[in-house]
Image: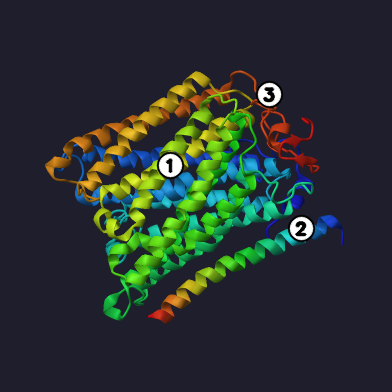
Amino acid sequence: MSATAADIHDSHEHSPAHTGIKRWLFTTNHKEIGTLYLVFSLIMLFVGGAMILVVRAELFQPGLQFVNPEFFNQMTTLHALIMVFGMIMPAFAGFANWMIPLMIGAPDMALPRLNNWSFWLLPVAALLLVSTLFMPGGAPASGWTLYPPLVLQTGDAFPFAIFAVHLLGISSIMAAINIIVTILNLRTPSMSLLEMPLFVWSWLITAYLLLAVMPVLAGGVTMLLMDQFFGTSFFDAAGGGDPVLFQHIFWFFGHPEVYIIILPAFGIISQVIPTFARKPLFGHDAMVYATASIAFLSFIVWAHHMFTVGMPLAGLMFFMLSTMLISIPTGVKIFNWTATMWQGSLTFETPMLFAIAFLFLFTIGGFSGLMMAMAPLDFQYHDTYFIVAHFHYVLVPGGLFGAIAGCYYWLPKWTGHMYDERLGKIHFWLTAIFVNITFFPQHFLGLAGMPRRIPDYAVQFTNFNAMSSIGAFGFGFSQLLFVYIIYKCVKGGEKATAEVWDNPEGLEWTVPSPAPLHTFEEPPVYVSRHQVIGRQ
Amino acid sequence: MTQDKQLRRKIRMNAILLGLVALGFFLAFIIVTALKN
């Protein structure tokens, strides 16, 4: 049975139990595991990024230049799987590990050994996934949706890829269990549920989503495995099965997965904006209810990903309208963030710049989503570059910008040093400009009819593709500056105070910077969101 | 039973329960899909 925080805590010293590699292999400390998650996700950002640069290099001009179509499809598939499961989800798990115990006044995560296991499954799974490239037949080339019968044509790599997905799922489920149990049991007694910071609330809801849908993905890929190796016909029409059923199962997981990625980013933005607007978050409770509503609605909209498979009119209407409903709680959030800034004493440090860019660019992704929610219009956009533009606007300036904002926001708390603000701003402008050069032209490509997942295209698409490729390389190389800024901040720089920013809200700012290895061994007294003990 | 032990017990029970819920979803989806076919 897994040890609890109390067990581990009874025996700990105030310095790491091991040194060198063993310190990181055997650590049960939430801050060290958080760091591991964050470093891992940064590495995966470059692995997944390198793969998509192969794709964008190939698409720079029409014709086949660098890679054959099979390898091209393997690159798009692995890029997506790595970015979703290996980069952005671990990044937010890293934030959760670092910040949730600090924000709720807990000494550690409730199940520290499980926490260690959750992390260390990830590099194994990622290596397994990347290693499929070197197996006979190559990596899966079906896209991250793994639709049968296409995915069943994968060579020897098929069971390894499925096993990697299983491992990634197990890791996520264990992390989700840990987060729920920590928030519900180790919160300082003076903090009520509704008083919790928005980042903690977002993660609590995300963890329930993970718990509900990761097993569905695991079930789906297990059935694929059984169809391939054990003679079943879950998705094989010849044996009485139904390939469309897999699409239903996948998207029952896949749509909530989008919110698993974006809700923690919402949580970070809800922490950043009040700090730099120097005002409390507008409508804190409404934000909690909006987040819960988004999570609930995410379970009843999945078939909008598959309007074109042929479904009854009633089905089209239901999924069209339920999808549109999501814009209501999302709109509540956008308006509340804007209202928080209204008449605030705004300053524009790097985390705030990323948060504001998030607000604008995520909203573009939201609006194009609303366009696709309309079934008759979706018939036109389906499987075009418009879809690629839409979901990248949601996931990159949405999810990734949220993660980068959080990184700049809490980096001084983690390292004890201020990052280089001038370089941070340069990083922001490069990233914000290149992300738009990359993804905005893809809207036009899609509307003009360019299909997604093709290595070659008609010549009329050349200019926008060239623009998109230049943007992608610029975006990718700009992130090297991000790595340098983090490295420089870890190595030294201006000392950060405990508060770091100008009177920020939250318990995490009451501990010194850098946060010591062990914090809140006694539950702190929490007065209210705006009145933290020691700073009233 | 001390308060500390009670907390440990509660944490473990919560975690096991949530793990069983996840396992239940996993099995339920496979069984429902099998029955549908």
As helix, strand or loop, the secondary structure at mark 3 comes to loop
Callout 1: chain: A
Residue that mark 2 sits on: B8
- Identify residue for label 3: A497
Q: Amino acid at mark 2?
A: Arg
Which three-letter amino acid code belongs to the residue tagged 3?
A: Thr
Nearer the viewer's eye, disc 2 or disc 3? Answer: 3
The type of colouring in the image is rainbow
For image coordinates 56% across by 68% down, the residue present is B23
Looking at the image, is mark 1 or mark 2 nearer the viewer? 1
Are circles 1 and 2 on residues that touch, CB within 8 Å?
Answer: no
Q: Is residue A420 above or below residue A175?
A: above
Residue farthest along the front direction in this orientation:
A343
Picture quadrant where residue A142 is located: bottom left
> Does A307 sit above or below residue A337?
below
Q: Secondary structure at mark 1?
A: helix
Separation of marks 3 and 1 at Cα, in angstroms: 32 Å
Residue A48 horizontal/vertical position (percent): 38, 42
- Is residue A408 at least partly visible in the picture? yes
Q: Residue at x 71, y 39 (%)?
A: A529
To which residue does mark 1 refer?
A: A362
Dot 2: element: helix
Q: Nearer the viewer, residue A279 or A303?
A: A279
At x 61%, y 49%, the residue is A286
Whether tag 3 and tag 1 are in contact, CB under 8 A, the answer is no
A374 is higher (above) or lower (below) than A346: below
Quarter of the image where one finds residue A429: top left
Q: Are marks 2 and 3 in contact (CB under 8 Å)?
A: no
Looking at the image, which is closer to me, A430 or A34? Answer: A430
Q: Could you tell me which chain the residue with mark 3 belongs to?
A: A
- The answer to whether residue A327 is left or right of residue A307 is right
Residue B15 position in % (x across, y down): 66, 61
